[in-house]
Image: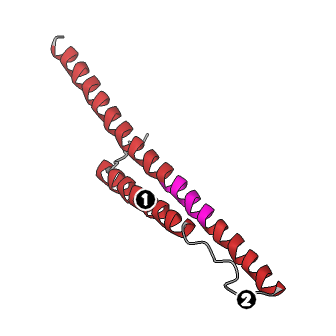
Amino acid sequence: MAEQSMEVDTAHLHAGADRCSDAAQTALTAAGKLAGKEPAAGMFGDFAEAHEFHQAVSAAHRAHVEQLHGHHRALTGIGDKSRSAAYEFTARDASSADSLRAAEAGFDTL
């Protein structure tokens, strides 16, 4: 049976988590700024088609704000999972190393 090994660069996992957190914060900031700048009523004129177009633009505006909030949630989740994976790999590696040292110590007493 071939030996299997796996290497995990936890520093890269943490760096990726940090980048996701930065991107999540950027999305949240953008959502806040966009939400604070709603299209003004009457900006396209004061006739039926202009009001209809304003409603369409306002709906798209709200959808973009919600989409940015969705990006914030997704990026926060990815960052959290990446950070959690890095901690888990580190803990498992330390636990495995402790087990190997204990086993080696047991063989030394034989």
Gap between marks 1 and 2 measured at Cα: 36 Å
Q: Position of residue 9 (x, y in %)?
A: 31, 51
Does 66 lie within the magenta span? Answer: yes
Q: Position of residue 108 (x, y in %)?
A: 16, 16
Residue 4 visible (yes or no)? no
**What amino acid is at disc 2?**
Gly
Q: Which residue is mark 2?
A: 45
Q: Which residues are magenta?
A: 65-75
Q: Main secondary structure of the magenta part?
A: helix
Q: Residue at x 65, y 66 (%)?
A: 62
Name the side, left or right, on which 65 lies relative to 99: right
Identify the secondary structure beneath mark 1.
Answer: helix
Q: Nearer the viewer, residue 91 or 2?
A: 91
Residue 19 location in percent, x, y?
A: 38, 60
Tag 1: amino acid = Gln
Quarter of the image where one finds residue 2 = top left
Local crowd at mark 1 within 10 Å, few (<14), some, or many (≥20)? some
Indicate left or right for 25 with 95 as reference: right
Looking at marks 1 and 2 on the same chain, the residue that comes earlier in the sequence is marked by 1
Per the image, the residue denoted by label 1 is 25
Quarter of the image that includes the C terminus: top left
